[in-house]
Image (cartoon, grey):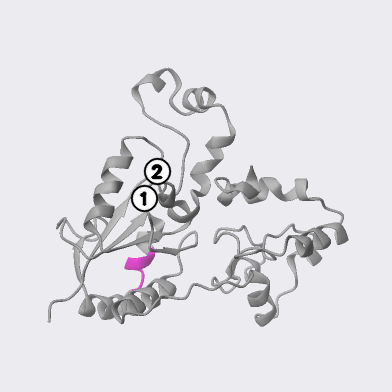
Amino acid sequence: MEKPRIAFFDFASCEGCQLQVINLEEDLLKVLDAVDVVSFREATKDHSDDYDIAFIEGSITRRSDEPRLKGIRSNAKVLVSLGSCATLGGINCLKNFQPEAYVRKFVYGDKAHQYETYPARPIKAVVPVDLEIPGCPINRQEFATVVKDLLLGKKPEIPNYPVCVECKMAENICAYERDLACMGPVTRGGCKACCVTEGSFCWGCRGLVDDPNADSQREILAKHGLSVQDVLGKFRLYTGFSEVAK
């Protein structure tokens, strides 16, 4: 029986999500037993435009990226956005809050005219996306689970509860109790609250849960002497493309 063919592509990103796939180590061998990887620049020189599932990392920051992305979409039976940049627009969208002329000059100086750019956006703003795996970077075990579900014909279930649930399971001290503003009450879980567990706060890299409890978030902020405006900048770090940060 012919194995499903999968391919990996990247646009504007650090490519850390693809490295997480490689970091599966022994579990990667199990994935490779079930699929044929026909394109993966991080791991092989081979390339083919004949694939069933396309995994895409990175946001779209140039108009000239769009034809390539649309070509990938037309070839793929299933297209999966991989990581915060691809699913949310990510950190690249921070530039969208500054005048484009200022950004171009700040980054490229007197060579700005040589470089193309436009406001950053997630993959789904350009082409239809079948599934999104959030995170910065992605959780490699979540990736492996998604691949398994896709091969079994199951719809992968990405967690839709806030990071606070996982904080309670880990018995973490709330970041707000440590005088840190945290995105956990409205951010999608699935990361095992790794940042809070390590002593930091949730940065919101997995995006908002569906129907976030905004009233509860406001109550938490008010309890600790903060307002919505105090944390909007933090939301913009990853979710700048969404309306919540505009």
Q: Which residues are magenta?
A: 20-24
At 62% from the left and 68% from the top, the residue drawn is 198
Image position of 206 with respect to 162: above or below: above
Q: Where residue 188 appears, x then y in whole percent?
A: 59, 66
**Amino acid at circle 2:** Ile
| Label 1 or label 2, whichever comes before in sequence order | 2
> Which residue is labeled 2 in the image?
60
Amino acid under label 1?
Answer: Val
Magenta-colored segment: predominant secondary structure: helix
List the residue tagged with mark 1.
127
Residue drawn at (57%, 71%) of the image:
160
Is 207 placed left or right of 56 in the picture? right
Mark 1, secondary structure of its residue: loop
Taking the view exactly as shown, the residue that stands out farthest to the left is 1
Mark nearer the viewer, 1 or 2: 1
Q: Quadrant of residue 28?
A: bottom left
**Residue 62 in the image: above or below residue 24:** above
